Image: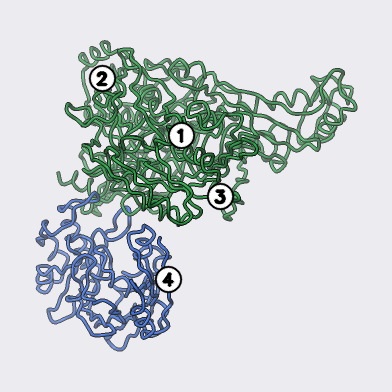
Chain colours: A green, B blue
Amino acid sequence: MGVEGIGARVLRKEDQRFITGKGKYTDDFKIAGMHHAVFVRSPYAHAKIKKIGKSKAEKMPGVVAVLDGKQLTGDGIGNIICGWMIHSKDGSPMNMGAWSALATEFVRYVGDGVAVVIADTLENARAAAEAVDVSYQELPHVIEATEALKKGAPQLHPEAKNNLIYDWEIGEKAATDSAIAGAAHVTEMEITNNRLVPNAMEPRAALANYDVAEDHFTLYTTSQNPHVARLVLSAFYQVAPEHKLRVIAPDVGGGFGSKIYIYPEEIVCLWASKRTGVPVKWTGERTESFLTDAHGRDHVTKAKMGFDKNGKIVGFSVDTVANLGAYMSLFSSSVPTYLYATLLSGQYNIANIHCNVRTVYTNTAPVDAYRGAGRPEATYVVERMMETAAREMGMEPAELRRRNFVKAFPHQTPVIMCYDAGDYNATLDAALKAADYDGFAKRKASAARKGKLRGMGLSCYIEACGIAPSAAVGSLGAGVGLWESAEVRVNPVGTVEILTGSHSHGQGHETTFTQLVSERFGLPTDNVQIVHGDTDKVQFGMGTYGSRSGAVGMSAIVKALDKVEGKAKKIAAHLLEADEGDIVIENGEVKVAGTDKKLGWHEVCLAAYTGHNLPEGMEPGLKEGAFYDPTNFTFPAGAYVCEVEVDPETGKTEVIQFVAADDFGTIINPMIVEGQVHGGITQGLGQAMLENAVYDDNGQLLTASYMDYAMPRADDVPSYKLSTHETVCPGNPLGMKGCGEAGAIGSPPALINAITDAIGNNNLAMPATPARVWSAING
Amino acid sequence: MYATNYHRASSLKDAQALFKKADDGKFVSGGQTLLPTMKQRLAAPSDLIDLRHVKDLKGIKVSGKKVTIGAATTHAEVATNEKLAKACPAIASLASHIGDPAVRHMGTIGGSIANNDPAADYPAAMMALDATIHTNKRQISADKFFKGMFETALKDGEIITAVEFSAPKKAAYSKYPNPASRYAMCGVFVADHGKGDVRVAVTGAGNDGVFRHKAMEKALAADWSPEAVASAKVNEDDMLSDIHGNEAYRANLVRVMAKRAVAAAG
């Protein structure tokens, strides 16, 4: 309804401030008397702290305190926890090692915090941090997860024998093994999913203030979920009681998952502010982002897929080792299990699946959810296997997929998920058509004449978003519920404020959320304000990650809007002396259907607040809240086609075209969805051909700056050809599925399938750098 | 960055005086390497003496075949100078591909060659063009000026004033950028000076900075064609190896870039 309702390409309201440099980020906030924190970090991958010499630093100009881990734990600050319990297949709970916000006895990765200096200026804090004299006793370290599991490997945590955090499985092993044993064809692969650094544009930051007069804490922080931060900071870390702690996540410059977690720095700033009596600000430097933001991916997988003689998959067996780094970050345990193995059925009807996952401690940065979180890893395994199997069996890759597609819904997979709706043939048809699949042979021949190798690769991905029914995730070990809350406040003049527990850090909520009001009441989006990111304003919320703000966050808004609409109609019916069922609201007017009797929306709102003439017994005001708990995950899916040209002399890959046909269910704002897909695909192509977090033999992060960590740039990628194909999600009132991660999930296998097709060598690991591609060509 | 004193030198004389006065002074001429290094606290000069605004160090002169480029001339100026583009299009094209527009408007040719980053573009051009490096004290041939990674023949306090070379008959530079930094993973500058005087200089790939590839020079002197260098032997032991590519890959790039440079030079 209206030009700004659902489906309209409304320009992003937030861009005015973002593109004119007027956004207000954590580092932009200043509090009188503010001091600066600089962390002293471990230069070693693994060491015992022998002594922390603070006396020189403490005497330096402007220094108010030099604090360490023993003081922190001495003040009763709790260890950092992982909030999702996973049990090993023998029933034992995961082996979680202790993680103190500042190391007390051992450091376990380069960048581990050892001490913090609080000083009046950043320069003084930095100078003093350099003067803190820490003596270490170096210990043997281990970087690769598969190495960490070996006998005699250096041990990180006494709680985790052999560095094993858990040994978990899903699906039926015996049935899967036997199906594969009887298969007409078996495809076997070893697949690595490379470690990534999130690289949000804004580095993490925290500004903490303890107000002694009010006995109250305020924390400005770069968080995707400020309420969860407050809950965890109070309930688990005992930094501040929940009702005396206000957490504000103002404008946040990108998260991609890395700003879900509660990091040591926020804890330390809050604690230090109370201990020293001054407001404390920390803003991470880019190097600190590389070293200490939770990294993503880092899986090593062995997979076997069995097919019958018609190309039908009979069994799929997967064995994965996942590197969780030196400590278990907040949701790290769930990523390689319930967010990964549950998606191994892909878009396919597979009767038997078994997946075993071992997670491992290593002397590297903690690893947690990063755009897609588990689903890119699953999709990469499934879609590399499908393309490889098609080549091995001499089948068209598209045809092999079609033979195995799930076609009837709902579809229960053997790995928990129940797919609710989709049309995988439709997205594949659309993608192949847009890519001119039939004309590929001709283009390949023409490229060959120029000395270039052309290749084409497919990826038919499915993912699970909108996480998720609280009871379901609770039964799987989640420490929190995953609903969302919203409050719709209608002002007496008819303008609207929506308070939401979702958090926007680039997603455009200030635009899309207002479109719901426009759709419902026909009001201009400019009459609607979105309020989020402040625990003093919004009652509670679970935040934004896992493409959940549409399917879950907006569903909560819809529920609250239902209540507002109901009450407004009652008031209007009373004022217009009509039947409530005859009242319609459109274009900012409240009308009696089939008559010319009407009121302006603002008149009804004003009536609600004057209270002069309300239906008997009705409370004044027009403000409603709602909590929405999803009934299922949502299942965005689609087909991606990538076409590349490889220069055999240099190994350089040019992405000639990239086609994405996505099914996101209902789309609120196509322009914003396209932006999400552009970003997602680019991030996925970045993983597949450029990005790689590499530690050297000493445990130093070699790729700790943009000199060595290759991010995708505009000239690395083509203009994408996008289309969407709606099957409405039956699980939520708007029929939405989620679009935030799809691009990053679906694109890596499409690119690697295309390059391996071009060069005729399937043995190629991500990132497919020119050097690797050249080596693969030259054997 | 540690606190430092910034001075904008008004003349060469002024620059030398400022340098003498400083505890631990460093000349800066664009600072495209020095400033990031200082920001990372890996360098901490007490005084920065900015040469970029010294008039005598700026500008491009082309008279006949003789080309003189002032040390404080920016990459953007080299890339867009019309006379230079006619006399030696290869160096103009090289300059147009250094870094990004911001880098090209700050960075200078003198700053670049004084730093002698093993992946910088200009050192290859200087060697292949047989350039002479003018300083406030002397003139040094490019062959003698560049001495391994980040090392030059410059003495403490010595300032590059200009580079001078004779426009070659034909020349071209072919660069393969590092996917992350976009510095040269391998850049090959080929120049035909006539009468069998051919020079081939390689940046980015070698394990000791810029170098001349004598075998390629010989092959091209005999037969100026891409094929002449396509199968030239490049010693892998002399190549860099890192996460972006091993010795074999870089040796291959030297051949491929040389071939493409010759083809581009025509």
Query: How much space separates mark 2 and mark 3, taking CA atoms?
Result: 65 Å
* Residue B122, position as x, y percentages in the image: 28, 70
Element on which disc 3 rests: loop
Image-quadrant location for residue A357: top left
Res. A562 mark: none
Residue at image mark 4: B5
Same chain check for tags 2 and 4: no
- Between A79 and A131, the one lying in front of the other is A131
Query: How much space separates mark 3 and mark 1, taking CA atoms?
Result: 25 Å
Same chain check for tags 2 and 3: yes
Q: Identify the subunit bearing mark 3.
A: A
Residue at image mark 1: A261
Q: Amino acid at mark 3?
A: Met
Q: Identify the subunit bearing mark 1.
A: A
Task: Say which label, 2 or 3, has the lower sequence index.
Answer: 3
Task: Say which label, 2 or 1, has the lower sequence index.
Answer: 1
Task: Say which label, 3 or 1, has the lower sequence index.
Answer: 3
Residue at image mark 2: A307
Q: Identify the subunit bearing mark 2.
A: A
Same chain check for tags 4 and 3: no
Q: Residues within 10 Å of mark 2 (few under 14, many from 20)?
A: many
Res. A34 mark: 3
Q: Are marks 4 and 1 in contact (CB under 8 Å)?
A: no
